[in-house]
Image (cartoon, rainbow, N blue to C red):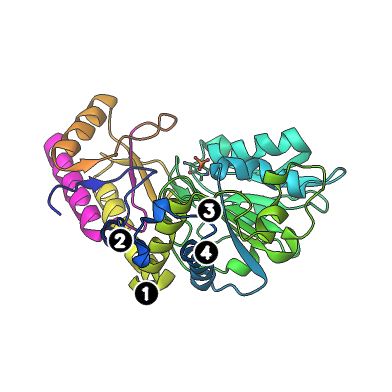
Amino acid sequence: MSNRIINFNAGPAVLPLDVLQAAQEELLNFNNTGMSILEISHRSKPYEEVNHEAEANMKELLGLGDEYRVLFLQGGASTQFAMIPLNFLTPGQTADYILTGVWSEKALKEAKLIGQTHIAGSTAEGKYRRTPQQEEIQLSDKPAYVHITSNNTIYGTQWKELPSFGPVPLFADMSSDILCRPFDASKFSLIYAGAQKNLGPSGVTAVIIRKELTENSPKTIPTMLRYDTHASTDSLYNTPPTFAVYLLNLVLRWIKAQGGLTAMEARNVTKAKLIYDAIDSSNGFYRGHADKDSRSLMNVTFRLPNEELEKIFAAESVAAGMSGLKGHRSVGGLRASIYNAMPVAGCQTLSEFMKEFCRKHG
Ligand code: PMP
């Protein structure tokens, strides 16, 4: 479609064109109901099918079986920052957090409101340019869980190898890289992700959780903040964000049709390489924020020689049909968010634009 531009927004972000068109096609009459999916009850059979299919698709893509549940909740990843310690940080226990950016700091801040915490590792000192080495991580004695952020949206870093701590339950915020590559999901007791980057629109948060963690939430915490409430009702305790779950399911179907996580990774590696190559071949004109071995497949962050050039770059990129490249204020510079739905051609255009800009101004 000629009036769609190349969308590098960090989230909400680009969605697959096929998904948008599928939603458009059935918007007025969903599955022969004579109504749109927006207009039908969350307790109706057609919606329950969507809800169940979304859970099944997510588990299939992650290679998970009956020992996991997938919940579709509201309140964004930010509500998970609080729900996790409310449910799993009981008095007398300590929860360990590994800090790799602002989002992990925010997760820690919520846990501190609820119980005792320990910073098991942090790369704050180097302005979050990398993720820690396993040997830099010091767990507390018998932590209730360890929390990591797998991809740091603002800094453009990503754990190349996801860590593992034996029997200690591992929890991860995968908001900005879930389903971008194959990984052993069974090492995680809980994974959560706001949908608005790799899964669909804003308004729904996916929580992939080991079944036994949904069985005994402390009785003292409010109903809506308990995992057992949502697991025992198939995420239908109250009215869920039906349209967001529906779109998320279309995105999961799309990932499956593309060939699943292996195909996603191959595409994402190709895409990221196009932009990192433009940085690395610029003789220092572009400076990546992330250390090379921590570079993200999802968010590419870079600076130019000065802020004036960064402004010109941002303005000219818009004129060239691209959007959303201005970086986050805490890092400055530029950021290209290239989630699963970004086509290879979009990264090619940016890479060529960067090389041309460097020739002109370098
Ligand atoms: N975690 C990460 C890694 C994020 O990138 C974001 C949003 N950019 C959040 C958490 C917060 O998500 P939400 O807005 O859904 O609360």
Q: Earlier in the sequence, mark 1 or mark 2?
A: 2
Of labels 1 and 4, earlier in sequence is 4
Look at the image and say whether residue 279 sits in the magenta stretch.
no
The reply to whether the magenta stretch includes residue 351 is yes
Amino acid, disc 1: Gly
Residue with the mark numbered 3: 174
- Quarter in which the C terminus is drawn: top left
Which comes before the other along the chain, label 2 or label 3? 2
Q: Which mark is residue 106?
A: none
Q: Is residue 121 above or below residue 316?
A: below
Pick whichever of labels 4 and 3 is earlier in the sequence.
4
Q: Nearer the viewer, mark 4 or mark 3?
A: 4
Residue receiving disc 4: 48
Residue where numbered disc 1 is placed: 259
Q: Dominant secondary structure of the magenta stretch?
A: helix
Q: Give the alpha-carbon distance from disc 1 to disc 4, as whole Å.
A: 26 Å
Q: Is residue 225 above or below residue 216?
A: above
Q: What percent of the width, then of the height, locates residue 9?
A: 33, 42
- For badge 2, the amino acid type reads Glu
Along the polypeptide, which appears first: circle 2 or circle 4?
Answer: 2
Marks 1 and 2, Cα distance to the nearest angstrom? 24 Å
Q: Residue furthest front?
A: 34
Where residue 13 sits in the image (x, y, percent)?
35, 47
